[in-house]
Image (cartoon, rainbow, N blue to C red):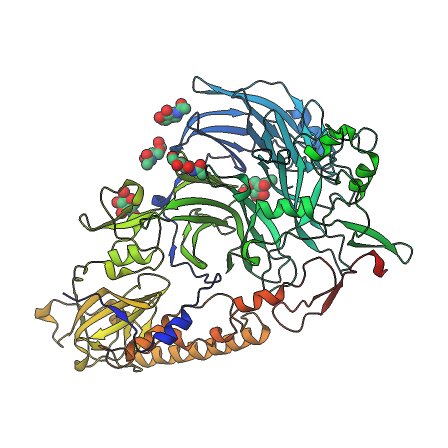
Amino acid sequence: MYPLLPVSLFCFLPLALMLGEDSPLDCVPRKTVPYHTNNSKLFREDGVWNYSIMLLREDLGLLLLGAREVVYALDLNNISNKNASVKWEVTVPQQEGCKNKGKNPEIECKNYIRILHTMEDGRMYVCGTNAFDPECDYMSYADGELTLENKREDGKGKCPFDPFQRYSSIMVGKDLYSATSMNFLGSEPVVMRSSSVSIRTEFKSTWLNEPNFISMAQMPESEDDDRGDDDKVYLFFSEIAVEYDFYSKLVVSCVARVCKGDLGGQRTLQKKWTSFLKARMDCPVLESQLPYVIQDTYRWCEPQQHWRSCLFYAVFTPQSDTSDLSAVCAYRVADISRVFSEGKYKTPVTVETSFVKWVMYSGDVPSPRPGACIDNEARKQGITRTLDLPDRTLQFIRDRPLMDQAVKPVGDRPLLVRRGATFTRIIVDQVQAADGRKYKVMFIGTEKGTLLKAVNYDGEMFIIEEVEILQSQEPIKILRFSNSTRQIYAGSENGAVQVPLATCGRCLSCMDCVLARDPYCGWDEVDAKCVALASAERELIQSVKHGNASLCPDADPVKPVTQSIWPNSHLKLRCLPLSNLAQPSWLRDGSSLPPSARFQLLRDGLLILNASASDAGRYRCLSLERSHNNLYATSVAEYQVGIASGKGGDSGQRPSPQAQDGPSLTGLQATVGLLVVLLAVLLSWNIYKGHLPLTRVCRPKKGAERAEKLEQAPGYGSSVTQQEAQKPALAEGKPLVSELGNSSHNNHTGGEVEFSAEVEENASPKLTLQYIKDESEI
Ligand SMILES: *[C@@H]1O[C@H](CO)[C@@H](O)[C@H](O)[C@H]1NC(C)=O
Ligand SMILES: *[C@@H]1O[C@H](CO)[C@@H](O)[C@H](O)[C@H]1NC(C)=O
Ligand SMILES: *[C@@H]1O[C@H](CO)[C@@H](O)[C@H](O)[C@H]1NC(C)=O
Ligand SMILES: *[C@@H]1O[C@H](CO)[C@@H](O)[C@H](O)[C@H]1NC(C)=O
Ligand SMILES: *[C@@H]1O[C@H](CO)[C@@H](O)[C@H](O)[C@H]1NC(C)=O
């Protein structure tokens, strides 16, 4: 039996420690799981597209799914089962009318279901774009049937006209809060509460400036609050900044909030929010100094904890095509709340006749505080409703809804930054691991139909896996999580899928199961299986914080495969390392395979060129994976290679097909040589053009260094050549994290802010954005 040796790198500990620096930018997923029907349950119907809105009805055991012209009720446990559906199609006259207004009858003039909410009485509220004439209706599920009540209500201001526009809505009690645009052209944005007294935003660019609405959430801020504050509804969106002088439109991310009890003003701000306040959100990603743009949020609240401990997780993408990084930042509700309740305001100042600058307001602030909810302070002054607010307060907030200070993320930096598939959606679950501690697990959907699973282990970001959950590599447009089924539901234009939080069974060995550091999974020593912690019958081997696989029992030896090779031919021995973080390494007859032109080490195997009799022997492939300061080796394949005799006969071993059918050896060598030269040219060109930045953003795979160190480690023979190690020094850059602190000068409080837009290279123009600290400077 071959020992699975956890090799502690005693002599190289300092180096190993340096490499092990905790970094939130360690962005290589440990595993990449290709699409397989086993990984998810799928729902789609022929001829139906745009599965764009989901509503979880855990009380009914249903998932409501809105698509184009139809709503489905699916079995929450298995969304492949359709329990009911109801059609809501546009009528011919509606479609004609829409067409006559210049819209595409087959695309835009359809009814895209956009809003689905549960009402207090258990019915549902549903709205659709309805051929550019939004309408809403009531819907109920009974006796296995989904029924629309046909009480068509005007959907203007609730649901977008344009199916391609982003919007958001939330049902709070009896009231629908919506953020969308109110008119046919999509040019009049509104944030509205539809209730007995409808309240909306002022139509002014200082309130909303070409916004893109992302999400809404409510916070029960009246609970346990000694100030007698009101509940709030938060809105996340991006918009065109008004406060920068910039060569072109600059998009910024924002959070706004309104008070639930807001009834509007008496004369000023009649039927308009008196509590609409907004603030910029920072998610500082080093590589680009242009602000990142918010794409989705997830509200995480600790069960049975005060609302102040709630967090908003948000995904961000770059401003334009300047970068392919995406980021996750988390914000404390308490921090957001503080900016609104204590922060300074920004105010517009006209300079040089018509030019408006936004600066910090430093004059007197009227009382009650503009934008505040009615609280005990106000009540003491005899103000019990927003209708009682003095004009001075209302006029102030009407003209200055923007806070001076931006909201900073937890730790003042992103939790996770990753290059590659753009992030689209996020959800967060909390799970108790075997060590008794609770960990928050982020599930992030991407534009390529993959789902990333990442955990922050005390500052060390670890991406457990990236799973392709959609076959067509299309963007994930909806991501939902049900705590009752412990399942994730994702939607795209072409279908909806359901995936479990973990598929532990994908790990076949203890080493793989433990190194996965998945808090949902552990190794069952008795059954020799990687199983879910939640359903485990006994104690499991798990080490999420340290990935300590030395707890694993020795694995069963790998069964050797017999292979024959013809003299002067070549042979490929396949071997896939356990994970993206692992590197293959080969041993022949127990000692490390010496580097040579004849032994090409590929990512997926070993290529033996121009074989001779001396190449016979036992070849063993190890997968080497570092976890914290230990290096773990797993035997993944073993081959007994013999030399085929000229006559062929008795051994029965046919030469490998590659050996027989492949090109001649010289031809192959020439091809390899040519490819290497081509690759080198391509790489240098790319680096020259700045496509491959030389500064490191993600921690590169350490396998190459590891393999080199291992070869010097006790018990290892001579070295291993590594084609991958030859890649140019991506790792050359300075540690990124340490720079984060100084880079976030743009704190919106004043001074001069330099946006040097050196995104990838110096060729970009240098842009300078200026702030004026406050009015006194003008
Ligand atoms: C898919 O599931 C089937 C049945 O459970 C199983 O036999 C098969 O091996 C699975 N395939 C993969 C790639 O996991
Ligand atoms: C609806 O789905 C189709 C097919 O994927 C897609 O081409 C189209 O852009 C989608 N329409 C909207 C409004 O999202
Ligand atoms: C889910 O439902 C589909 C369709 O009825 C069925 O084929 C499939 O086996 C079900 N899956 C599970 C895990 O029950
Ligand atoms: C939906 O259908 C499945 C089987 O098709 C059934 O088990 C489930 O009870 C149904 N759910 C409801 C709410 O009717
Ligand atoms: C999810 O459900 C479990 C029990 O079913 C409960 O302990 C936990 O608090 C729930 N989580 C949330 C966030 O509600």
Q: Position of residue 574 (x, y in %)?
A: 27, 66
Residue 76 falls in image quadrant:
top left
Q: Quadrant of ligand 2?
A: top right
Residue 80 falls in image quadrant:
top left
Asked if residue 477 lies left or right of residue 588, the reply is: right
Q: Is residue 549 visible?
A: yes
Looking at this view, is 766 or 226 the one in front?
A: 226
Residue 412 falls in image quadrant:
bottom right
Looking at the picture, does residue 132 appear above or below residue 759?
Answer: above
Q: Position of residue 323 (x, y in %)?
A: 59, 62
Looking at the picture, does residue 485 appear above or below residue 435?
Answer: above
Looking at the picture, does residue 415 appear above or below residue 162?
Answer: below
Q: Position of residue 500 (x, y in %)?
A: 37, 42
**Which residue extends farthest front?**
380
Picture mark count = 0
Looking at this view, is 244 or 166 the one in front?
A: 244
Asked if residue 622 lies left or right of residue 149, the reply is: left
Looking at this view, is 557 or 178 the one in front?
A: 178
Q: Residue at position x 18%, y 61% from top?
A: 554
Asked if residue 253 lies left or right of residue 525, the reply is: right
Q: Position of residue 672 (x, y in %)?
A: 38, 77
**Which residue extends farthest right?**
353
Q: Is residue 43 visible?
A: no
Q: Residue at position x 73%, y 33% from top?
A: 378
Quadrant the N terminus occupies = bottom left
Looking at this view, is 369 or 585 the one in front?
A: 369
